[in-house]
Image (cartoon, coloured by chain):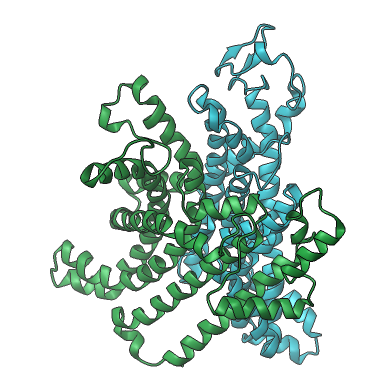
């Protein structure tokens, strides 16, 4: 069964709800800041507007669904704007890492020999450092910012996929149709690209889907510590950090962005789980465990 | 087998040292430039660079650093002016205790939850627990920590919680109080409740997810059917047959979780102001104190490699099938 057919059939009740939640948050992130009145980054009449509780109206009569932050900026609009950043980094970071991992794993398995040994040694060495430490190490070395977070997520997230793809490619390359393609004189790179890779990507796609939630969590973690996305550009992590010292006076400032974050990661995880169960139906394999050092 | 495994671990450690060095030197900017006061002259800067050995060729710097690390010398902290080893040694016990207690709770809570879910797969209780564990799994630890602080520290009075449920959220002991004996211990425990609960909740959710699918796989095996057919009671099926088969992977997970949870405590330590490794690493990062950051990375990596090694060596004891030599 091809990967895409697997994907299409994979969505059951729970994962449909999860996909719906993701679509809702993503479209909110795109649309809400576009239609909202005023600039969610601009600071206006701070004294009149700051720390309004959820569902309250300000003196001009505008409704603030989730209240306002310490500078009087609407929390809901900012949260949706932050969703753009967090979602984009989460998805792009995970896909980028998967692309690197697929390339390394596929080439290592295909070439074998010394290439394989060196690639796997580096993979193992990187896996020996908890991902969080690796992230912090990289974040410490470069200027914090959007692109740094993305690069760092990709650079620290590819090893798992590399090992998975390597194992799959090793299995697939021994199958008769690969021998047939080689015997017909198809060039090696083309055999790998056309025949081997499409049949090896299932588990990698599952890992990538589960990796999206992971990447979003890690981005929020870095931003929470001040090493990720920098204010005034909002991300869920730095919004939570921004509300940290208001946890007594205005707990919604810190807690609301976390709810959006949890819903998003939950949805991504549920979809990933579903894809994994679907694949496991075809062949038995151990479940992917996310150990504690990999998360925020 | 043993010698081979040890050699592998040593090789891996060497690779990690090399990687950490390479990463640190890949970074743009000159580490010395963070140390030089703004009023310094170019000559001062040059002297500082030569004191730190930064003017030597990269290869020389690398060999020096690698040899020092192997001897257990991680260099000197830029900001504290003390050996990195001392900085880490002071902070490590706090994180290790926090990690050990949390991880014990993680497994004690997580494995039974996963087992109940697997035993009642697809039923209401399984679905409820799946929602709960997946949500906890999706929540960032610092958010859980802040919520707990909102409820149990500041919200306690408003919500009318009894006095024993009003918990401190800052540091590991009450400042300004000279407590001794049991009183000091109780004070420490009260400070530890919220950080430990945060870490265990997040950890137990992950372990429960793992245990659920692990146990479900085992339950489908023939020996379970045989045991049931023989009329073995449920406690024997789960306590003996399922546990014996789940144990090896749990041991590996346990070994791998310890360095992970110590690293992961950076968020919890940051929220609760605990003077542990995570906080030390974070303040070193913010202060651009490279030797401490590099030293902490090497420390975490060494811990992970050792944990892996220990798990590998312990596995044959738990799973006799592994004593048969593999190809």
Residue A281 in the image: above or below residue A188: above
Give me the chain that's green. Answer: B
- Indicate the colour of chain A: cyan
Extreme right residue here?
Answer: B42
Residue A47: image quadrant is: top right
Q: Is residue B235 left or right of residue A67?
A: left
Q: Position of residue B74 (x, y in %)?
A: 58, 70
Residue B161: image quadrant is: top left
Work out whether residue A71 can be spotted. yes
Q: Is residue B48 left or right of residue A22?
A: right
Q: Position of residue A127 (x, y in %)?
A: 57, 70
Q: Is residue B258 left or right of residue B288?
A: left
Residue A206: image quadrant is: bottom right
Q: Nearer the viewer, residue B206 or B260?
A: B260
Q: Position of residue A203 (x, y in %)?
A: 58, 67
Q: Nearer the viewer, residue A104 or B97?
A: B97
Residue B269 in the image: above or below residue A21: below
- At a point 54% along the width and 27% down the height, the residue shown is A246
């Amino acid at each position: 069964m091809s990967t895409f057919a697997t994907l299409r059939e994979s969505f059951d009740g729970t994962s449909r709800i999860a996909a719906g939640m993701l679509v809702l948050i993503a479209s909110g992130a795109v649309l809400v800041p576009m239609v909202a009145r005023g600039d969610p980054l601009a600071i206006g009449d701070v004294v009149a507007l700051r720390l309004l509780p959820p569902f309250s109206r300000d003196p001009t009569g505008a409704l603030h669904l989730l209240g306002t932050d310490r500078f009087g900026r609407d929390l809901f609009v900012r949260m949706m704007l932050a969703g753009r950043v967090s979602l984009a980094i989460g998805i792009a970071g995970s896909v980028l890492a998967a692309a690197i991992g697929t390339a390394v794993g596929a080439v290592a398995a295909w070439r074998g020999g010394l290439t394989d040994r060196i690639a796997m040694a580096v993979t193992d060495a990187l896996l020996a450092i908890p991902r969080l430490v690796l992230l912090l190490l990289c974040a410490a070395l470069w200027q914090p910012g959007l692109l740094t977070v993305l690069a760092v997520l990709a650079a620290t997230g590819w090893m798992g996929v590399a090992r998975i793809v390597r194992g799959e490619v090793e299995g697939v390359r021994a199958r008769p149709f690969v021998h047939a393609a080689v015997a017909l004189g198809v060039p090696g790179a083309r055999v790998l690209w056309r025949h081997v890779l499409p049949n090896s990507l299932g588990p990698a796609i599952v890992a990538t889907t589960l990796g999206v939630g992971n990447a979003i969590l890690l981005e929020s973690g870095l931003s929470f510590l001040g090493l990720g996305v920098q204010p005034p550009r909002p991300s869920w992590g730095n919004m939570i950090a921004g509300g940290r010292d208001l946890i007594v006076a205005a707990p919604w400032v810190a807690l609301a962005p976390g709810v959006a974050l949890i819903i998003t990661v939950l949805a991504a995880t549920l979809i990933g789980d579903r894809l994994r169960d679907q694949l496991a139906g075809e062949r038995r394999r151990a479940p992917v465990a996310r150990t504690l050092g990999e998360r925020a | 087998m043993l010698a081979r495994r040890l050699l592998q671990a040593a090789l891996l450690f060497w690779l990690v040292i090399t990687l950490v060095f390479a990463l640190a030197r890949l970074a743009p900017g000159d580490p010395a430039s963070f140390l030089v006061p703004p009023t310094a002259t170019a000559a001062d800067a040059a002297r500082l660079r030569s004191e730190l050995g930064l003017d030597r060729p990269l290869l020389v710097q690398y060999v020096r650093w690698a040899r020092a690390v192997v001897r257990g010398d991680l260099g000197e902290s830029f900001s504290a002016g003390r050996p990195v080893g001392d900085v880490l040694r002071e902070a490590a016990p706090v994180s290790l205790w926090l990690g050990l207690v949390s991880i014990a709770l993680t497994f004690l809570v997580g494995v039974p939850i996963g087992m109940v879910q697997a035993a009642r797969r697809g039923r209401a209780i399984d679905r409820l627990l799946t929602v709960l564990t997946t949500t906890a799994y999706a929540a960032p630890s610092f958010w859980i920590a802040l919520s707990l602080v909102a409820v149990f520290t500041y919200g306690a009075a408003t919500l009318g919680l009894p006095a024993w449920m009003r918990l401190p959220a800052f540091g590991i002991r009450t400042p300004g109080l000279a407590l001794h004996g049991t009183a000091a211990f109780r004070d420490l425990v009260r400070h530890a409740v919220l950080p430990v609960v945060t870490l265990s909740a997040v950890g137990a959710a992950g372990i429960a997810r793992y245990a659920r699918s692990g146990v479900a796989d085992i339950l489908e095996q023939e020996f379970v059917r045989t045991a049931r057919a023989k009329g073995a009671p449920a406690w024997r099926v789960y306590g003996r047959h399922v546990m014996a088969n789940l144990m090896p992977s749990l041991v590996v997970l346990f070994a791998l979780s310890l360095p992970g949870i110590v690293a992961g405590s950076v968020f919890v330590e940051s929220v609760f102001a605990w003077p542990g490794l995570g906080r030390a690493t974070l303040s070193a990062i913010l202060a651009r104190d490279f030797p401490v950051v590099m030293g902490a990375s090497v420390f975490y990596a060494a811990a992970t490699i050792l944990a892996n090694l220990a798990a590998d060596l312990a596995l044959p004891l738990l799973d006799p099938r592994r004593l048969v030599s593999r190809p």
